[in-house]
Image (cartoon, rainbow, N blue to C red):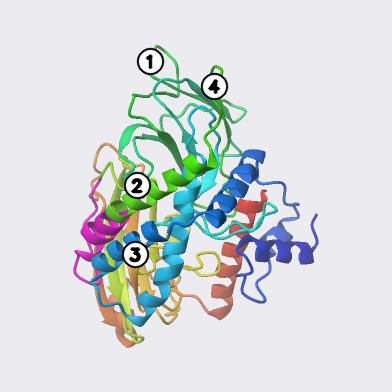
Amino acid sequence: MKSPQALTALARQIRGGFLAPGLVLAGALLSGHALAASVLDTSDQQTLDAKAISINASNNFSAQRAGVGTAYVTAYGLILSPQAALRLNPALNELVFSAVQKAVNNDPLYPKVYWLNAPPHSGFGQQVPGGRYSFDNPDNIYRTIPIDGASSYVIHGQRSGSGPTDVTFSLINNPNSQQTIAVLTGNDLVVNADGSYVVTVDNQPANGRVNHIQSTDQAVQLFVRNNLGNWNTETPDQLSVTRVGTPSRAPRSDAEIADDVRTNLNESALDYGVGALGIKTYINPVNTLAQPSSSSTLGTLTTQASSFGHFKLANDEALIATVNTGGAGYFVFPVTDPWSVTVDPINHQSSLNNKQAVPNADGTFTFVLSLQDPGVYNWIDPVGLKEGTIMARWQNIPATTPATGGPAITTQVVKLANLAAYLPPETQFVNSSQRAQQLQNRVAGYARRVAGQ
C-alpha cells in the first residue's frame, strides 16, 4: 500500500499542484488497497502527450487563436466583465492544446487510443497542459481513435467491475463539429463474463457481428465517452485499437499535424464560438436554462438531451434548478466558466450527477448554485465566479417516456436569506465537516481515476 505522503503527492501531481492544502486522499487510504496503474496510462498515451507538447511548443498558432478569441467575445457580448476577461486567455490556451491533441491522433493508418479534453495533469511522467473546451464534463473520460472509411479496425475493451455508468462509441465526420454518423451505446454493447469485449469498425454491414459499427467514406474518428457516475467505484474501460492490414505510407509529419491544428482552430471559431457559446448558450436569457433537446452536432450525443444556459449572480443570491431526469440512466448538472471550461472540478463541487446528488422524494433533483455555501448537500460551487455557463446532460434516455414525464428543467433566482422557503421540505443539508468529507471523497475519486484502482 502506498504511504499517505505518496498519495498526497500523487494528488498534487494530478492537477499540477492545484490540490488544496490539507486535502488528503482519505478514501484511498481507508480502503486498504494500493493504487494500481491507471488504464489511461498507456505507452500510446505517453507518446501522444509528448508529441502534443512538442507540437504546441514549436509552432505559432496565434492567428488562429485570435480568430477563436474574437468569436468567443462576440458570442459573449463584446464588453467583458473583469471575471470573463480574466478567464479568456486560460480558456483559449486550453482550446489551442485541445486542437493539438486532436491533431496528433488524426492518422487513420496509425490509430491509437488517446485520452484528451482533461484538466492539467502530470500523473504519467509528463506535465501535460489542460485541453478542456466546449463544456467539458468532469464525469467523462474522453478518448479518440482515428478512423477512415476504407480501413477495418478492431477495438479491444476490458471492463473492471460493473463498468462506467454510461458508455458510447460515436463515429463522427469531423473532430470539431462532431457530426454523428453512427453510434454504439452502452445498452447495445455486448460484454463477456470476464469483462472483455471487441468492437469492430469497417464499411461493411454487421452480418451477425456484435458490437459492429459500419463506417462510411465520411468517417474520421471514433469518439469514446466513459461517464463515471460514482468516481470512487467506477473505472474507465481499458481500450486498445488495431488496424487490419499494412499501412500504405509513413506516418504524418509534424508539419502536417501543425496544419491540422490550424484547421481545428479555424473550425473551432464557428463550432464553439458561434455555435456552442452563441447560438446554444448566450442566446438564452440570463439565469435560465433552455428545455432539454437532442442534437447530432457540436459534441452532443444523439442519445443525449442537453440544456444550455448562463448565469450571473450576486453574492447574496442563489439559482435553484429543479431537474426531472425523465428516466435517464445518467444525468449531470455541471457549471463552467464564461467560456465553457470547468474551473477546478477536482477540489470543488462544481458538478453533481444522479449518483452523487440526493434526489427529492418525487425522484426529481434540486440543485443550488451560489457563491456562498448554503449548506445544501446538492450545492453547485461556481469556484468564485459570479457568472458562467451551464450544460446539463441527460443520457441513456428510455425509448418510452415514463409517467413522470421526460427530461425537463426549471430555474429561479432567490435571495440566499430566503433559500429554505423555496426548497423541498426533504432537502438534505450538511455541516462543515460533512462538506469536507464530500470534497475529500471527490479528490480521492479523481485520484483513483488517474492512478488506477
Looking at the rendered structure, the kind of residue marked 3 is Gly
- Pointer 1 and pointer 3: residues touching (CB < 8 Å)? no
Looking at the rendered structure, the kind of residue marked 2 is Gly
Please give the label number shown on residue 441.
Answer: none
Residue 139 picture location, percent across and down: 48, 54
Residue, disc 4: 247
Residue, disc 3: 69
In the image as oriented, which residue stretches furthest toward the top? 207
Of 347 and 338, the residue lying toward us: 338
Q: Name the residue located 58 percent from the left edge and 53 percent from the top edge.
A: 53
Looking at the rendered structure, the kind of residue marked 4 is Pro
Label 3: how many residues lie within 10 Å, few (<14), some (14-19) or many (20+)? Answer: some
Q: CA distance from mark 1 to mark 2?
A: 26 Å
Upstream in the sequence, badge 2 or badge 4?
4
Residue 176 picture location, percent across and down: 36, 46
Q: CA distance from mark 1 to mark 3?
A: 42 Å
State the SS at label 2.
loop
- Is 281 displayed left or right of 359 in the figure? left
Q: CA distance from mark 2 to mark 4?
A: 30 Å
Residue, disc 2: 299
- Is 450 displayed left or right of 288 in the figure? right
Which segment did they paint magenta? 272-294
State the SS at label 4.
loop
- Pointer 2 and pointer 4: residues touching (CB < 8 Å)? no
